[in-house]
Image: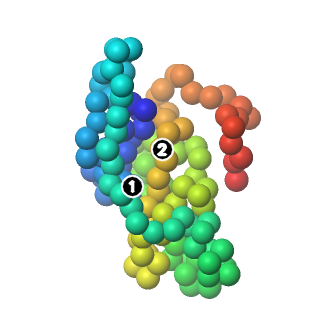
Amino acid sequence: MRREVANLQTLANAGGSVPRVLDHNTGQFENPGVELYVVMDLIPGPTLSEYVDKTSGLAIDTALRFALSLCETVRIAHTFPILHRDLKPENIIVRDAEAPALIVVDYGLSFNLLDDDITQTEETFRNRFL
């Protein structure tokens, strides 16, 4: 949780399309008596998966605009170097399909390449990877 907050704050400050962290107390993660919390922006809109289902697919120009928008957030993340590790249509919110304004959410599995306590190659945790 602490890593997710730090990564979201870093990416938001760098211009990444992620929810802003409004408040948290993750700095107290070592105190077992403290219930941790995070308050983030509410991002209205369907997930990319829901949007594609609702529109029966994407036109090639829309798909290209979406891909370029997502690539910009991934590019920003990799400069820190933060890896999302769970990028999938269910973790992308379509705030505005015309702009496009896509927001990448759920950085719970993200890590900084300098971290040493990460999952290993081919290790999964109740998840399907695309």
Residue at the image position 40 percent from the left and 66 percent from the top = 44
Q: Is residue 75 visible?
A: no
Front-most of residues 62 and 97:
97
Q: Mark 1 sits on what residue?
A: 18
Q: Horizontal and vertical percent for residue 129? A: 69, 48
Q: Mark 2 sits on what residue?
A: 107
What amino acid type is highlighted by mark number 1? Val
Q: Image check: 127 left or right of 11?
A: right
Q: Horizontal and vertical percent for residue 93? A: 48, 63
For label 2, the SS is loop
Residue at the image position 48 percent from the left and 44 percent from the top = 107
Q: Quadrant of residue 85?
A: top right
Quadrant the N terminus occupies: top left
Front-most of residues 68 and 29:
29
Q: Which residue is farthest right?
A: 122
What amino acid type is highlighted by mark number 2? Tyr
Packing grade of label 2 (10 A; few <14, some 14-19, many >=20) is: many
Q: Horizontal and vertical percent for residue 72? A: 44, 62
User: Which of marks 1 and 2 precedes in the sequence?
Assistant: 1
Residue at the image position 50 percent from the left and 77 percent from the top = 65
For label 1, the SS is loop
Measured in 3D between alpha carbons, the distance from the residue under mark 2 to the one under mark 1, in whole angstroms, is: 9 Å
- Residues marked 2 and 1 touching at CB (< 8 Å): yes
100 w.r.t. 83: above or below: below
Residue at the image position 57 percent from the left and 27 percent from the top = 118
Front-most of residues 92 and 44:
44
30 w.r.t. 56: above or below: above
* Number of numbered discs visible in the structure rendering: 2
10 w.r.t. 105: above or below: above
Q: Image check: 42 left or right of 128?
A: left
